[in-house]
Image (cartoon, helix red, strand yellow):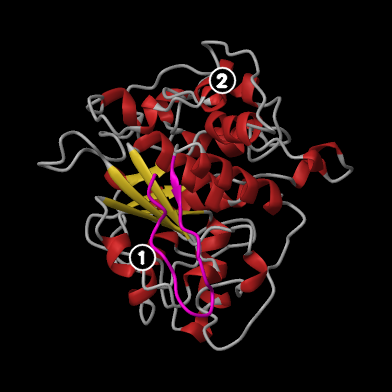
Amino acid sequence: MKHLIFPAVSSAVWGLDQINGFSQMNKTCAQSLRHSKDESFKKAFLPNIRLFLHNDSINMSEWNRLSHFNNPFGFMGYQYNDVMSVLKLIPKPKEPLLLPKPGSGGCVRCAVVATGGILNGSKMGKEIDAHDYVFRMNGAAIKGYEEDVGNRTSVYVHTAHSIIASLIFFENYGYTSAPHDEGIKYVLIPEGMRDFNWLEGLFKRERISTGPYTNERPWTYYGRQYSESRFYVLHQDFLRYVRNRFLKSDYLYDSDWAIVRPTNGAFTLFLALHTCDTVNAYGFMTEDYKKYSNYYVEKNVKTDVIFYANHDYILEMKLWKQLHDSKVMRLYQRTDSETGTEKLKQH
């Protein structure tokens, strides 16, 4: 698998956190991606990578180690007191992110739904909702788009910026709030200091006192479904692992290297790959992306996909196709953008 690199793994960096998905899941699912025969994927994939950041996982030694990496991959440039006071507020998860459903035979089947225009007119809604769990991220508009994208959300992945900006950006498309299904679990990507400001306000139930979101009340953005027991923060080790082992972009060797990171969609997809047995991806960029609008909400206009400088979209697109071709996951691809679609290609 091109672009994969395999750095040395130390137990200090990749310590097993017993609350991390597969470490407590039924491992008997015959269809599990853990049984992949693809050698490059098997070599790069670390099933027990630490997924979540919490107060039990951080101390002075860990702070010092993570201070060697720029955000969102570590604490470089941050002030110890500013961040550590927030980290101490993050409770250790009481259960894995996902558990097998009754009668599932131990298999956890997941759909990961991105926002790509390829879903416009796809009629994939029922197929998406048929999964055990549905992951979404960013501007996950559902009302009015159910036929194409489904209406269930089990896990919503976001940053402080994306949960706020999506309300503004997609307001004209009927988007009024982040998903707030009963029992939903929320996962935050700590991409910068503004996210730690967000977490402080969220856990203290206080208005944010500093930074770009001063006076915001974070808990109000979760539609009364926010609960500490169902809120998770991704660990910097996991974010760095996704970049280093699967999405090591050539952009990292340019002058603007410090801003380059995988997309929220990429982090969400890899979170699913680490907590589910089978993963089906919808709305992600495919080789024929130029046929579709940037977002599925853009029903009556054809827009071009926007390439932001901090992401390597083409590298991600190639990886999704590689993972699909190697049967690690399934990627939804259109067969004819004008006359119809096909369901996920079966292997």
Residue 315 percent across, percent down from the top left:
69, 46
Please tell me the numbered disc located at residue 62: 2
Towards the viewer: 289 or 100: 289
Which secondary structure class fits the magenta region best? loop
Quadrant in the picture for the C terminus: top left
Q: Which residue is mark 1?
A: 179
Q: Is tag 1's residue or tag 2's residue first in the polypeptide sequence? A: 2
Determine whether label 1 and label 2 are within 8 Å by CB.
Answer: no
Q: Name the kind of residue labelled 1 in the image.
A: Pro
199 is within the stretch colored magenta: no
Q: Quadrant of the N terminus?
A: top right
Amino acid on which disc 2 is placed: Glu
* Residue range of the region highlighted in magenta in the rendering: 329-347
Residue 27 at x, y percent in the picture: 26, 24
The reply, left or right, for residue 112 in relation to residue 21 is right
Secondary structure of the residue carrying tag 1 is loop
